[in-house]
Amino acid sequence: MTTKSIKLSEENYKKLVELAGRLRAEWKRSVSIEDAIKYLMRRKISDLAGSWDISDEKVREINESLRKVWSSWRRSA
């Protein structure tokens, strides 16, 4: 296997280490940073459903903004 080096911010490295720790507890085995990255790459956007912590007010603001933008679009014939 060929290995490559990549640069990560300290923040992203810490998040990968935290994810590896959670996966290690869940999978009950050793988990590398590479395993954590592979796990993230296999996820689909639908896997994130319900994981965004947002207030009802903010949802209303977003929806209203979208309605305004969508209403300004014109369909081309």
Image: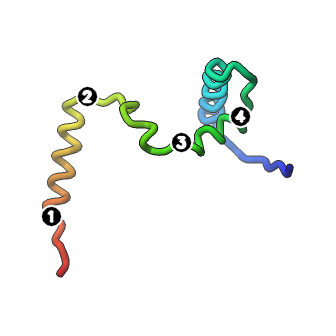
- 2 or 3: tag closer to the N-terminus: 3
- What residue does disc 2 label? 55
| Residue with the mark numbered 3 | 43
63 relative to 70, above or below? above
Comparing labels 3 and 4, the label whose residue is closer to the camera: 3
Residue 51 position in % (x across, y down): 40, 31
Residues tagged 2 and 4 counted as in contact (Cβ below 8 A): no
Q: What residue type is labelled 1?
A: Ser
* Mark 4–mark 1 distance (CA, rounded to whole Å): 46 Å
Classed neighbour count for the residue bearing mark 3: other residues with Cα under 10 Å, few (<14), some (14–19), many (≥20): few
The quarter of the rendered structure image containing the C terminus is: bottom left
Going by the numbered disc 4, the residue's amino acid type is Ile
Q: Check whether the beta carbons of the residues at disc 2 and disc 3 lie within 8 A of each other.
A: no
The image shows residue 6 at horizontal and vertical percentages of: 73, 47
Q: Distance between the residues labelled 3 and 4?
A: 16 Å
Considering every residue shown, the one lying at the far bottom of the view is: 77
Determine whether, in the image, residue 48 is placed left or right of residue 42. left
Could you tell me which secondary element the residue under label 3 belongs to?
loop
The three-letter code of the residue at mark 3 reads Arg
Q: Which of marks 1 and 3 is nearer the N terminus?
A: 3
Mark 4 burial class by Cα count in 10 Å: few <14, some 14-19, many 20+: some
Q: Do the residues labelled 1 and 3 touch (CB within 8 Å)?
A: no
Q: How far apart are marks 2 and 3 (CA)?
A: 25 Å
The local secondary structure at tag 2 comes to loop
Give the labeled residue for mark 4: 33
Which residue carries the number 1 mark? 72
Identify the mark nearer the N-term, 2 or 4: 4
SS for tag 1? helix
* First reached walking from the N terminus: tag 4 or tag 1: 4
Between 33 and 8, the residue placed more toward the observer is 33
